[in-house]
Image: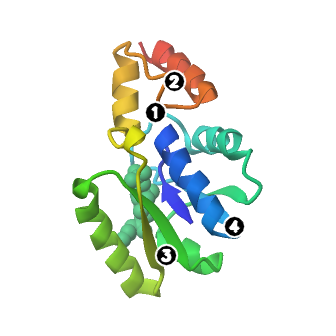
């Protein structure tokens, strides 16, 4: 399982998902709904963008989850969470979550080092740069870029 909010999916996410798809028979990309958080895209939009972007992988499916990651894992018989690590700053929180998830349900977390091409990339930065008119076309798939520009126009 590759969990996240994917608001929106970036080339960094896709790099991890693509590499995970080479290692595992099946990869479930799970979009956290978490309605209390303010998002630029609805979970339906985030899911749709992910489905478009991961369509090339035969063994990747996109799903949504609400509540605890480990409950989704249990319901779907998932044993491994795959997470990308961009920098040591990611590790601090990811380690806590991995240990908590292992303690709760015995779910393992495998960390994959991010391709250095994307080590600076985050959905938050992409949204911020796009909001202020910066060019993020090299950071997200083309279809996501189009939707980002549209959303920024709508919100201005
Ligand atoms: O891409 P993000 O924003 O880092 O993803 C966050 C996400 C969806 C993975 C996070 O909100 C999450 O883990 N939600 C599920 C709640 C949960 O299981 N929390 C306990 C983790 S130890």
Q: Quadrant of residue 83?
A: bottom left
Q: Residue at 60% across / 77% down in the picture?
A: 78
Is 78 located above or below residue 151 in the figure?
below
Q: Could you say where residue 21 lies in the image, as x and y percent from the top left?
A: 64, 60
Pointer 2 local density, CA inside 10 Å: few below 14, some 14–19, many at least 20:
many
- The residue mark sitting in front, 2 or 4, is 4
**Left or right side of 136 for 86:** left
**N-terminal-most mark, 4 or 3:** 4
Q: Residue 26's mark? A: 4
Q: Is residue 2 visible?
A: yes
Q: Secondary structure at mark 4?
A: loop
Q: Secondary structure at mark 2?
A: helix
Viewport quadrant of the N terminus: bottom right
C-alpha separation, residue under disc 4 versus residue under disc 3: 17 Å
Mark 4 residue's CB less than 8 Å from ligand 1: no
**N-terminal-most mark, 1 or 3:** 1
Q: Residue 155's mark? A: none
**N-terminal-most mark, 2 or 4:** 4
Q: Residue at 58% across / 31% down in the picture?
A: 141
Q: Which residue is mark 2?
A: 148
C-alpha separation, residue under disc 1 versus residue under disc 2: 9 Å
Mark 3 residue's CB less than 8 Å from ligand 1: yes
Say whether marks 2 and 4 touch (CB < 8 Å): no
Q: Residue 40's mark? A: 1
Viewport quadrant of the C terminus: top left
């Amino acid at each position: 399982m590759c969990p996240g909010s994917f608001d929106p999916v970036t080339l960094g996410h896709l790099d991890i998902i693509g590499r995970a798809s080479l290692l595992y028979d099946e990869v479930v990309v799970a979009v956290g709904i978490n309605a209390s958080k303010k998002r630029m895209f609805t979970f339906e939009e985030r899911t749709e963008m992910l489905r478009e972007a991961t369509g090339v992988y035969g063994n990747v499916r996109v799903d949504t989850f609400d509540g605890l990651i480990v409950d989704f894992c249990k319901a779907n018989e998932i044993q491994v969470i795959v997470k990308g690590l961009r920098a040591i700053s990611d590790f601090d929180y990811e380690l806590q979550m991995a240990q908590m998830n292992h303690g709760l349900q015995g779910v393992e977390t495998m960390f994959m080092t991010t391709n250095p091409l994307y080590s600076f990339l985050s959905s938050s930065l992409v949204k911020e740069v796009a909001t202020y008119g910066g060019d993020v076309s090299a950071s997200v798939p083309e279809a996501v870029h189009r939707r980002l520009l549209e959303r920024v126009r709508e919100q201005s």
